[in-house]
Amino acid sequence: MAYDEETAERIRKLLAGRRDVVGKKMMGGLCFMVNGRMCCVVSGKGGLLVRVGPDAFARVLSEKHVEPMEMRGRVMTGFVRVAPEGFRTDAMLKRWVERGLAFVTAMPKDAAKKHPAKKSAAKQAAGRKAAAKPKPARLVQWQAKKQGST
């Protein structure tokens, strides 16, 4: 499914004054990269994907027209999917794009370039279990609703 060109053009206008923005076709849509970091995506599945970061993730999920971003059955913490009703007006869209910009521009400059040494599968699994944070209530509700509909 192709992404919404009208929404993409609205985002291009919002980001027109920045020299550090590149649009790339990826993830089934058009991704807007700022300084090489994913900021937001006009999704081919409909809606807008916005990178809000892990700290704002739970708070943002409580807003209308927002749900977690899921890729291949896995919830991507720090990214949310906003339904088209959530960015209907230019002011609403600007607010979401600014949220994505705020997160990616606050990231350390070298964070995107560092690649940690690979761990064995057993160490990765143990680390995930030990470092698991409690899921936000809205995320748990969304997952339960999704499982009930399948």
Image (tube, rainbow, N blue to C red):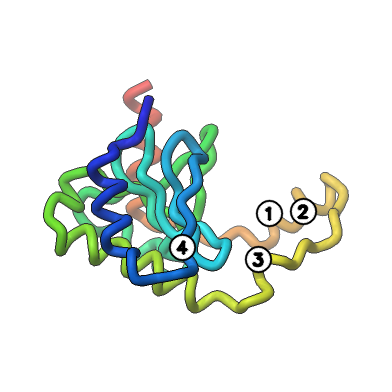
Distance from the alpha carbon under mark 3 to that under mark 1: 25 Å
Q: Height in image: 66 above or below 144?
A: below
Secondary structure beneath dot 4 equals strand
Q: Tell me whether the residue at label 3 lies in contact with that at label 1, contact meaning CB atoms closer than 8 angstroms.
A: no
Could you tell me if the residues under marks 2 and 1 are in contact, i.e. CB atoms within 8 Å?
A: yes
Give the alpha-carbon distance from disc 2 to disc 3, as whole Å: 25 Å
Secondary structure at badge 1 equals: helix
Taking depth in this image into account, of 99 and 73 the one nearest to the observer is 99
Instruction: First in sequence, mark 4 or 3: give its number.
Output: 4
N-terminal of the two: label 2 or label 3? Answer: 3
Query: Where does residue 116 sit, x and y in percent of width and height?
Result: 80, 63
Disc 3 target residue: 112
View extreme (top): residue: 150
Nearest to the observer: residue 96 or residue 14: 14
Q: Give the mark nearest the N terminus, 3 or 1.
A: 3
Front-lying residue, 83 or 8? 8
Badge 4 local density, few (<14 within 10 Å), some, or many (20+)? some
Q: What secondary structure is marked by label 2?
A: helix
Which is more foreground, mark 2 or mark 3? Answer: 3
Give the amino acid type for the residue marked by disc 1 in the picture. Lys
- Residue visible at 27% across and 59% down in the picture: 13
Q: What number is the disc on residue 21? A: 4
- Find disc 1 in the rendering and name its residue: 129
The CA span between labels 4 and 2 is 38 Å
Residue 73, visible in the rendered structure:
yes
Check disc 2 and report the residue beneath it.
126
